[in-house]
Image (spheres, rainbow, N blue to C red):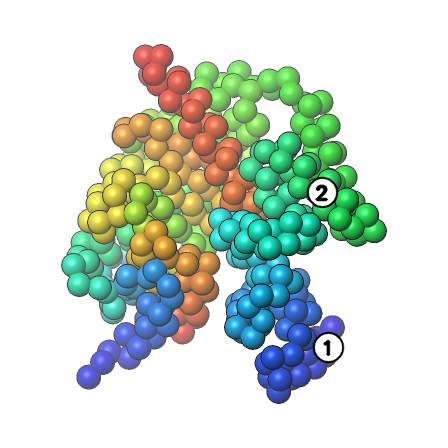
Amino acid sequence: MAREIQAMADLFERDPGSLVFLELGEELRRTGRLESAVRVALTGLEWHPSLAEAHDLYARILVDIGDLDRARAVWLQVLERHPRHVGALKGLGFLSFWDGDIDTALDRLETALGADPTDHTVVQALMTVRAAVETSAAHAEPAAADPVFGGFEGADDGMLLVSDRGRVLGGRLRGPDGDDVSEAAAAYLSGAAHEAERTARMLGLGAWHWMVAEAVEGNVHVSSPDPDTLLLVVRDRSVPAGRLAVVAERAGHAARSWLGDGHP
Amino acid sequence: MTHPYVRLLDQVTRVGGVRGVMLVVADDGLVVAESLMEGIRGGAVAALAASLTRRLAMVTKTSAVGELGFLQLQAEEGTLAIVPAPAGVLVVAVGGSDMNVGLARLEMLRVAEVVR
């Protein structure tokens, strides 16, 4: 495959207006060379600005980079001109799925299947979403009795509410060995809410909304349900940034509700 | 004469929406090099950015997700993005709400590779 990519890259260099950029960009994306994939896709778009497949390629790369908002915008633009574009429908279907909007996800994917019933990737995507819906329904019973996040998935190992003074208020974090590391994490974050607020203010960026720390094995989403508390949601890398944000938003609602009831 | 790192930082400032970029010592928040739009208080921001990065790096290390690779602070009117470089230096970029975070991140990673 490396030789094939090199051959395509050589062809692309000789003739940047060639459509080989579509396959080259996709192979670079699939092999994780995202920086090169972006450059190839953007060059291709300069030559073929109205080619839907080029925009679709760019959006897929943006998803891999983690820029889901921009990917969504690109795919929506494609659908404006080509309402039954399978790639855009499939991409938007998955983004809706990750956002927890199952109805829209199924709607997009079923429309994609109607546009091309022979596309096995759409069939596979539909099966994945439907299986997730069934699994989720089967596990709908609350599993944890945490006072703040009772019933939330990950309340026992990947969700933590701390005061800005470093006190654990709810949830729990676990370390690589399964040990409870909630107290340690809370201590590291003592004062962080106000630090984030000062940083954003000094930069003239207004109020801060959230932070995301991306690490080798996963991501940490940090938000502030109220000015004196921080909410951490930790998930492994299989959970996309957009999905992580949705989980954090729901957990934030639960935290605000709990805090509003007079706790702690 | 232009500081050699400033030319490097220009790769990031060329990305759409980026208002400035700095190289900051991770341990103490001192600015090594900067290319900022007028009005941004580089020194003060660098210290706070370094402190936030240290905190979040400890959280990722303590929990099960490992070494911090990228930190993004999203605010109402813009973004602060931070990439830790191997040499104990942070690449810190600030941009408006129109900042292309994905591309900025790629350029920041390139800078981090060079200053290692």
Q: Which residue is mark 2?
A: A111
> Of helix, strand and loop, which one carries label 1?
helix
The vertical placement of B7 against B63, above or below, is below
Name the residue nearer the viewer: A259 or A88: A88
x and y, in percent, of residue A27 in the image:
67, 67
Q: Quadrant of the N terminus of chain B?
A: bottom left
x and y, in percent, of residue B80 in the image:
33, 53
Q: Residue at x 68, y 78 (%)?
A: A8
Circle 2/circle 1 CB separation < 8 Å: no
B10 vs B39, left or right, is right
x and y, in percent, of residue A125 in the image:
73, 44
Q: Residue at x 69, y 30 (%)?
A: A133
The vertical placement of B77 against A139, above or below, is below
Q: Quadrant of the C terminus of chain B?
A: bottom left
Name the residue nearer the viewer: A148 or A33: A33
Quadrant of res A153: top right
Quadrant of res B8: bottom left
Q: Earlier in the sequence, mark 2 or mark 1?
A: 1
Which amino acid is tagged 1? Glu
Name the residue nearer the viewer: A203 or A149: A203
Using the rendered image of the protein, determine whether residue B28 is visible from the camera's viewpoint: no
x and y, in percent, of residue A20 in the image:
67, 75
Q: Which residue is mark 1?
A: A4
> Of helix, strand and loop, which one carries label 2?
helix
